[in-house]
Image (spheres, rainbow, N blue to C red):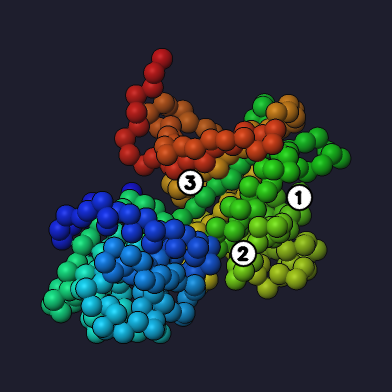
Amino acid sequence: MLFTKLSPVMRWSVEDEKWMKAALEEARKGIGLVSPNPPVGAIVVKNGKEISRGWHRGSGLEHAERIALRGLNPEELEGAVIYVTLEPCSTQGRTGSCCELIVGSGLSKVVYGVRDPNPVHLGRADAILGAAGIEVVVGVCEEQCADLIRGFVMAQTKQRPWVMVKTAMSLDGKISRPGGESQWLTGEEARGFVQELRGEVDAILTSSETLRIDDPRLTLRGPGLREGKLQPWRVILSRKDMEPKGFQVFEDDHRERTIVMDGNDLQEAMRSLVHDYGVNTVLVEAGGVLVDAFLELGLVDEWVGFLAPVVCGGDKLALGGKGIDELENRIQLDRVTTGICGDDVYFRARVNRGPVDALMR
């Protein structure tokens, strides 16, 4: 986790958890759509019944609280509670301060899940709302709410995006079929899963070497495309100057969403994606050498891996570099989920940055 545990303003109830989970469902509608803002959901409840809800739909558009409160007057909101996944903002932006809106709304209680990592807002809502006589409860479903905005948290606190790596390999640890065969190693179901991953992120990143070998499109496609989802930035990392032509990413209908960046400084490239392009989340789809470079710099936060039931041969490894020379230095994953995609096996997990567990022998 990138947050320390909150010190709640007061204890919360099972009812509070119930409605915060509903707000989380609302917030998840914004995953992949709202950067550089975080996805946020809100539910307004009175006398134990929901009276309105809302979710943030994009940068510059109304915040979830404003959508949920739209059209409700102070009489309707007297004694009501608003549940918000993220601390309400406390400064005047393009859509105004949500704290100011809440103070004048008639609401008697605000329950939010996690503090805003933006230092401009961090922790200010409690004092503003409390001074207006509004009860504030903090930390309900905190872990789930923080996980929902992990890309935004990373951008605000580390000045880089949340980095997800996608790898696919054969049973002998290779990433490509012999020359002349299809470039696809995994099956159609796994490729559909990858499209879902692309729909979650703000940028898809690969290397100039992968571009040269595979000429990938790196586009969103298939039946699951969501309304309002932009083609993620297609980021090509190159250690040498390259001419932006001759490949699909430079010539198709999304060519304006393609960026070539210096591959000699990954940390600076990540910083630039946040500050210059509003990117909170990146999906790395590249060969083993680039993936290893991200690992070496501690820039991998999440990993999705596919194992195809085939033996390829060849010399292209799923993970390049020198590898781990001591068990104490190994990279450990947690929060692992696994499943089957057609004939392929997959896992999805987070990189554990804590102490490495002892290895059972």
Mark nearer the N terminus (2 vs 1): 1
* Residue identified by numbered label 2: 226
How crowded pointer 3 is (Cα within 10 Å; few <14, some 14-19, many 20+) is rated as some
Secondary element type, mark 3: strand
Point 39% across, 72% down: residue: 52
The residues bearing labels 2 and 1 have C-alpha atoms spaced at a distance of 27 Å
Eyeballing the image, is 253 above or below 337? Answer: below
Mark nearer the N terminus (3 vs 2): 2
* Residue reaching furthest to the right: 180
How crowded pointer 1 is (Cα within 10 Å; few <14, some 14-19, many 20+) is rated as few
Three-letter amino acid code of the residue under disc 2: Arg
Left or right of 307 on screen, residue 311? right
Point 22% across, 73% down: residue: 79
Secondary element type, mark 2: loop
- In this rendering, which labeled residue sits more in front, label 1 or label 3? 3
The residues bearing labels 1 and 3 have C-alpha atoms spaced at a distance of 24 Å
Left or right of 142 on screen, residue 352? right
**Residue 302, numbered label:** 3
* Residue identified by numbered label 1: 214
Eyeballing the image, is 154 above or below 185? Answer: below
Q: Is residue 281 visible?
A: yes
Three-letter amino acid code of the residue under disc 3: Glu
